[in-house]
Amino acid sequence: MRPIPPAGPQRTLVVAQLISAVGDGAYYTCSALYFTHVVGMSATRLGVGLAMAWAVGSLAGVPLGHLADRRGPRGTAVLLAFATAAAVATFLVVRSFGPFLVAVCLYATAQSGLTAARQALIGGLVAPSERTEVLARLQSTLNAGLALGAALGGVALSVGTRAAFLAVFAVDALGFLACALILLRLPEVAPAAGRAEGGPRLAVLSDRRYAVVALVNTVLLLRMPLLSLVIPLWIAARSSDLGWLGSALFVLNTGVVMAFQVRAARSVSGLPSASRAVRDAGVLLLASCAVFALSAADLPLWGMGALLVVGATLQVAGEMKQSAGSWQIAFDLAPAHQTGQYQGFFGTGVAVARTLGPLLLTTLLLDWGAPGWLLLGGLFLAAGCAMGPAVRWAERDRARLAPEAAGAPVVPSPV
């Protein structure tokens, strides 16, 4: 399998993803220290602002996805990429909490909408049998871009001046500006056919079965804050000599996803195989949590370090399985004429995990220790095993969600 897709829409999507991810990687590395150490914002205010922003972003995903369905996903994606660039550019002049809150809410809203519009683009430009592979490529590209951006952010951190931090924000803004221009090279995708007569405008909000599937997936997404937040704190609480290992485990995760996400997605080709992949992810995440729990024992440094590496390896294996399965499920259960709003709704799980995950997991794992890890692992296993029944239940009534009008599924316009 080629590491880079052949020329065409898939390659264009990959390039746009890479460029925007490099800027975001630098931003994520530097933003917290900039707003606390340079702007002078308290860590509490920063945390509250980010939580509020992602809460707003999670609410915006569905209507912006609906906009992509009605007005066309390419134009919507381009508009939201420009909006993201503008939001990041405002960080250059933010000097207090009020403007920061407005800017970060705009950033989270545009990012959530851009993700939904991009998914709708994939639904229109990529054959159903190839979507999971394309999403795996995009995930691999995302990790590569974040790694490159983190390296740029590291340079800014080592310099430590206001100008260095502002240069990072400028790079991120220019990255999304370039992303918007690159997306303009994609073929136009026709807007979806109108909704069924008398049907709700935002049908996904009344689709309880799809909501249950999205909720199960959100539980599994609680893995997201583990590597970036909880595990470094877990290590620091046990040994200052292993403080470097948190960064090393993050690099391990990034490298494995870059190298193996596409391969991990090969076995997923429909709802049954996707449900099995998510179930396997639950098993792997339970095993990962059990190994992390063992690291709480009184062990020599090399023993604790070895357990942490094993736990992180099991975690990234579960992450790749869960990602591949959830992508297939999210697309296959969404009506073809409402891909944007359904993807926007499914994507709210990421915002919820980012908002609630840090508080929940730091309390559960850092305060409870090994029992907390085992409880979290049991939750992952239960969610993984619940996905299959939830998907089968949601699959029963897909026919009723098809438009009554003679509208065809979204297809790309001729180039």
Image (spheres, rainbow, N blue to C red):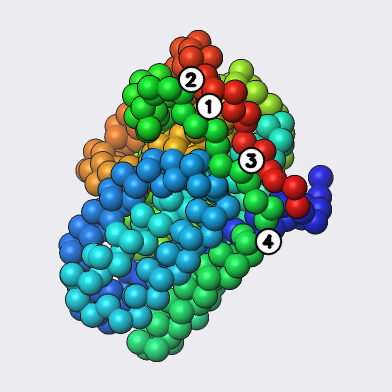
Lateral position of residue 138 relative to residue 391, left or right: right
Q: CA distance from mark 3 to mark 1?
A: 12 Å
Q: Amino acid at mark 1?
A: Pro
Report the residue marked by disc 1: 335
Q: Are marks 2 and 1 in contact (CB under 8 Å)?
A: yes
Q: CA distance from mark 2 to mark 3?
A: 18 Å
Identify the mark nearer the N-term, 2 or 1. Answer: 1
Identify the mark nearer the N-term, 4 or 3. Answer: 3
Report the residue marked by disc 4: 185
Which quadrant is the N terminus positioned in?
top right
Q: CA distance from mark 1 to mark 4?
A: 26 Å
Report the residue marked by disc 3: 124
Lateral position of residue 347 relative to residue 358, left or right: right
Secondary structure beneath label 4: loop
Q: Residue at x 45, y 83 (%)?
A: 167
Q: Nearer the viewer, residue 206 or 223?
A: 206
Report the residue marked by disc 2: 401
Judge whether residue 183 can be spotted in this image: yes
Q: Nearer the viewer, residue 119 or 137?
A: 119
Q: CA distance from mark 4 to mark 2?
A: 32 Å
Q: Residue at x 48, y 14 (%)?
A: 400
Q: Residues within 10 Å of mark 3 (few under 14, many from 20)?
A: many
